Amino acid sequence: MDSIEYNEGSNISIADVLELERKAEEKLLINDPENAISHIQKIIDKYYGKDSEERGWYLQTLARYKYRISKSDSIKIQGSAFKCNKQLLKPQEGIIYKKIDYINENRVKRIKDWVSSHGNYEQMMIELTSITDNLRFLEPSEKFEKALQDLGSAIGFLSEMPDKEIKKGPDNLWCVGNNQYFIFECKNEVEDSRQEINKTEIGQMNNHCAWFEKEYQTSQVKRLIIITTKNASNQGDFAYEVEVMRKRKLEDLKKHVTDFFKEFKKYNINEISDTKIQEWIDVHNLDINSLKTNYSEKYYQNK
């Protein structure tokens, strides 16, 4: 589908940005942080007014400059930078976790936005293949968890990684509907030969479920541990209702997501009705009920 429309970014003058960066660094070198800050602030105000990873980067630069004038202001700015881009430095005083809530914007629209963010069908499928390739057992956990986050976003959910972002909670968290969630504990680096989910892993899952319960105060959550075995050690007990996603179920999910996006090949994204996309969601077992029932299984408690 070469007709997927490409979303143009804002008209950013790279030359202008580089010139402002140069002026800022020059002012900093002569111990003039106020004017250095003003140049970086111009970049943020002119080109990065909305939350984005790039805005976060320049806010972090602003925080670095501000540190020479006010440590407390610098920490506050770094907190704002971290909220825009979780890959940046976490502020010294930490941040208050803000739970993700269902936005009154339907899932189909978010899927359309994800599809149209790519230049064409081929580029979209390259991105999707990159995601699914990283969703494999024995893949480094950081790549796996990021891929799971991206997969959630692609199929229309609000998706984040609390453990990486704030060092608390599960590896991955999806908000799939009004007050409805999926939490994932990813143990994809576990070898196939592993016989059971060990006591430590059970304890981690319990802790992360307790964190979710405290933050979200809802029982509408699907709790999943992604691991090679469904047998749980008799040395520990899950304190919550937890199910296991093993290799075959993960592969099923990846295949159904891939088949779903293949449906877009012959269409212009602006000409596809919401009804048609919802039909594809249902056909490929990506509706909420199917996601809750088709891709996981109950664990077995060893005696």
Image (cartoon, rainbow, N blue to C red):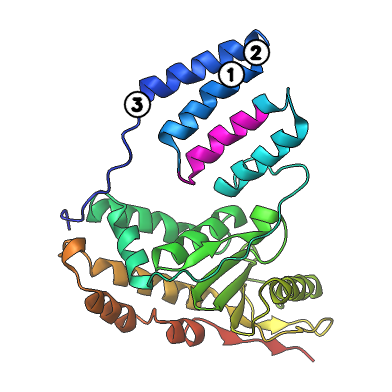
User: Residue 239 in the image: x percent, y percent?
Assistant: 77, 84
User: Residue 273 in the image: x percent, y percent?
Assistant: 20, 73
First reached walking from the N terminus: tag 1 or tag 3: 3
Q: Which image quadrant is residue 235 in?
A: bottom right
Residue found at the far bottom of this picture? 303
Q: Amino acid at mark 1?
A: Ala
On whether residue 59 falls in the magenta region, the answer is: yes
Helix, strand or loop at disc 2? loop
Question: What segment is highlighted magenta in the picture?
Answer: 50-64
Residue 135 visible = no
Q: Amino acid at mark 2?
A: Asp
Residue beneath label 2, please?
A: 32
Question: What residue is drawn where x is 65% and y is 66%?
Answer: 187
Mark nearer the viewer, 2 or 3: 2
Q: Split into 4 quadrants, where in the image is the N terminus?
A: bottom left
Q: What's the mark number on residue 13?
A: 3
State left or right for residue 121 relative to residue 12. left
Alpha-carbon span between mark 2 and mark 3: 25 Å
Alpha-carbon span between mark 2 and mark 1: 6 Å
Residue beneath label 1, please?
A: 36
In the foreground, 105 or 125: 105
Asked if the residue under mark 1 is in contact with the one under mark 2, i.e. CB atoms within 8 Å, the reply is yes
Helix, strand or loop at disc 1? helix
